[in-house]
Amino acid sequence: MEFQRATPEERRLYYREEWDVKQIPRFIRDSLYQREFGFDHHGRGPNDRYRTFRNEDHLRKFMRYRTPFAAYTSVAFYQKPNRREGWIKSELVFDVDAKDLPIRSCACDSVCELCLDQAKNIVSDLKDTLTSDLGLKEIYMIYSGRGYHLRVQDEEVLGTDSEVRSQIVKYLVGAEVPRSEYGQEGITYNLEHFAIPFGYHQVFTQRIKQSILHLTMETALDDVNKKLLKDVIKNRHLLLKDQWGPFRQAIGPIRYKRLTKGLAFTNLGLVDAKVSIDLKRILRLPSSLHSMVSMKCTEVKNLNTFDPFQDAVPQFVYERKD
Amino acid sequence: MVGVPFINPLSLEGREMVRQLGSLEDLTHDNPELIGIVTRSKSQDISDDQDIPRNHLELALKRLEWYVKKRNNPNFNYRKYAFLFQGDIEKFDTISFYLLSQAIGVKFGPNSRESRLMAESQGSLIQNRLEELNTRNREEIVLKALQELLSQGTLKWTFFEDLLSSRRIQLSDLVLDQGEVIMDQDDFRERLGPRLHHRDPDKMYQLLIGEELRELILIQMVMQQTENYMAEVHEKSRLMVEPNPLLLQLADGVTEILTQPTPSYTGTGKVARQSYRGPLNREAFPPCVKTALEGIKSGGRNDAIVLFITPFVSYARLCPDIFKQNVTVRVSDKDPQLQVVHQEVLPLIYEAAERCVPPLFEDQPQEKININAKIGFGMHSTLKLENEGETKWYTPMSCEKIKLHLPYLCRPDDDCKKIGNPLIYYNRKNWILSREQAESGDKKEDEGYSGEEVMENQDNDWIDV
C-alpha cells in the first residue's frame, strides 16, 4: 500500500462523511474544556494554536467546516487552556514512530508494513512494563498514522514533572546498562542483566533482545565495529531460546560489554523522549486524519488484532481512481 | 548504639530536641559539655584550639567545613573532625543542623549552591557515620530510621517522586513489581523468588536490595528532606519582618567557609591545574555545541539556542569552573560592566539563532527575552544589572539531558566518553590543546624544557566533576 498525501477534497469527504466526534476517545472528550487544541490548515505545521472548545458540538462543527490538514490536542489539562495557563496535570505519553526506529530490519525510506509491525511490538512491550513494573492503569493505545502513541491517564503519574518522566522513559526503553557487580561482605559477585528475571534487568534484557534480532549489517552502533556486528548476527539465534550465557561467551565478555553499551544508547531512540518529557506538548487528535499519509489516527482497542492497513484506512483511499 | 537523630536530625526525636531548646542566645556561649565531648573524642586532634568548636554555632560551621575540606582535598586531616562521628555529640549536632539549615534557608534560599552543599554534606555525614558503626548497629539504626520514613505498608514507586525528580535515585536502582518497591526480604522471597532458577532467593535479596539499597534510600531521603526543610524556612522567612541576627551571622560564616580558596587535587594528590579562562576557543567546543552553533534546521530551535547554547556559552566564557564552585555565582560577579556579555557572549548566541532555519528571532523575537532570563536577568528585553537575580543563571545541560531533550545534537567523539557535561569537555579540551601547543612550541623553538615539568603534566589527571 502506498502512502499518499490527502487532497483538500479528500479531507472534506473524510470529515463530512466518515468522521464522527464520538470517535474521539472518551478520555479526551471528558476533558475537552481543559485542553488546548492546535491545527495545521495547510500542511506547514500546527500554527493555529491556543484553540479551545466548550463542548463536543463546537469541535464537531469546527472539524466539519475547516477540515484541517492535521488536528492536535494538548496532553496537558489547564485552568485556562486558551492561554496555556494554570497547568493542572499532563498525560504521560510515549511516541513510537515507525520511521524513526533506531534499528529496523526493513530498508524502507519512510514507513512500511514491516517497520509498523516492529513499532507495534515495541508498543506492546512498553505497555507490559508500564503495567507489570510501574503498576500503571488506564493506558490507551493510539495508532498515529505512522506509528503509535501510548497515553497513560493514571492519576499516579499525571502530576509528575519532566525529570520523573525522563526517568520513566529511560527505565522503559532500557537506556542504561544495568549494574552487574554487587558486593557483599567484601566479596564481589558478577550478575549479568540476563541472570535477573525481574525489574529493570529484565526490561533491559527484553529490549536489547529485540534490538539484536533486528540488527542488520548496515546498523550503526556506537563502538561496535563490523566484525563484532557480524559475530552478533551470526550468534543471535541463541537468543531465540534465551541462551544468553552461550551468546555472551561466543561474543566474548569485553566485546559483549561494548555491545550492550551501544545498544543501551540506541534504545533511547525507541521513543521520542521529547514528547514524553514535554508537559505542554500537543499530540495528534485520535480520530483525525493524518493527511500526509492518508491514514486515520485511531484508538487501538486490541493491539493483537489491530492492522493499520485494515483499521486505519479512510474510505476515500479505496475510492481513489489510480 | 547511636540514636536516630544522629543519622536523621529531621526525625521525630530530632524535632523534639529542638522543641526543648531554650533561648537561642545561649547557643553562642561556650558550652563546657560540648567542649568536653569534642576533646575526649577518640582520635581527635586537639593540638590547635581553632579546631575545637566551643558552641553550637561553631559546631554548625565545622559540619560544613568538614565536608568542603574533605571534598576538595584527599589529604585533609580527618582527626581534626573526629568529634563529628561520636554518638554522644548527637544532641549538639542535631541543634547545629537546624541552625545551619535555617541560616542557609533564610539567606540563600532553595536551589542555591549553598543549600545543595548543605544537603550533600548531610548525606556524606550519614554515610561516614554509618561506616564507623559495627555491622549489627549499622543495620539496626538504618532499619529504625527507615521505619519512620517509610511508615506506610506497601511502598509505591511514586512515593519516591521527590527523589526521582531531583535525580537522587534512579528508577532503575529500585526493584519494582506491580508498581511497588520491593524492600522487604519476605516480600522479595514470596513475589520474586519463584522466578529465580538455580539461585538462592535470600542471597539474591542481599545482593540486589539488602543493606546497600536501604542505606541509599535512607541517605537520599534525608538529603531531600533537608532541602525541603530549607525551602520551607525560606518561605516562612519571607513573611517575617527581620530574620534572627544569629542566623544571619551564621550565614556569613557559611559564606566565609565556602569562599575560601580551595585548590583541587588530582587522584595522585597533586594540585590540579586551573580551568582555562579567556576568550571563547571554538576549537575546544564539543561536537554538540559546534552543531548547534551551525544553526538548527528543524524543530527544536528554541531549546537548542535558549536552553542549551545560552548557558554553555555564558559559562564557558565567564565561569568555566562553575562545577567546582561552592557558592552561587552571578554574571556580574565575573563581568561587572556586562561588557563581555554584550561583546562576546550574546553575539555568539544571536549568530547561532540567526543561522537556524527559519532564523529564530524572525518568527519568535520573544526568545531574546528568554535568553536574558536564562543568564539571570529576569524576563526583560534589555540586560540591566538592577534586574539581575530575578531569574537563575542556568548551568549548562548535562550530556544525559542533551540525549533526552536534543538527541540530534549528540554525536559523541572520543573525548566525549570521558565527560558528562559539555562544559567539562570544553575545559578538558582547552587543557589538551594548550598542552599540545606548549609541546610543539618547545620543539619548534628547540628550547630546552624541563623533563620534570612534562612528567608532571602527564600525571595531571583530569579531575573536574
Image (cartoon, rainbow, N blue to C red):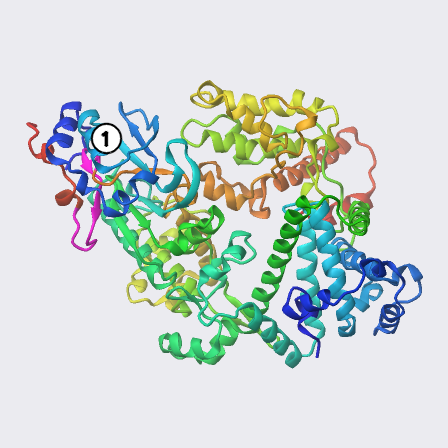
Main SS, magenta residues: loop
Q: Residues within 10 Å of mark 1 (few under 14, many from 20)?
A: some
Question: Could you tell me the amino acid type at mark 1?
Answer: Met
Total number of numbered discs in the rendering: 1
**Image quarter of residue B316:** top right
The span shown in magenta is: A288-307
Q: Quadrant of the N terminus of chain B?
A: bottom right
Residue B32 shows in the view: yes
Please tell me which residue lies in front, B418 or A315. A315
Residue farthest toward the top in the current orientation of the protein: B362
Residue at the spot x=19%, y=37% of the render? A295
Residue at the spot x=72%, y=73% of the render? B132
| Label 1 sits on residue | A292
User: Where residue B155 sits: x, y (%)?
Assistant: 46, 67
Q: Left of B151 or right of it: where is A216? A: left
Please tell me which residue lies in front, A202 or A72. A72
Q: Callout 1: helix, strand or loop?
A: loop
Magenta includes A295?
yes
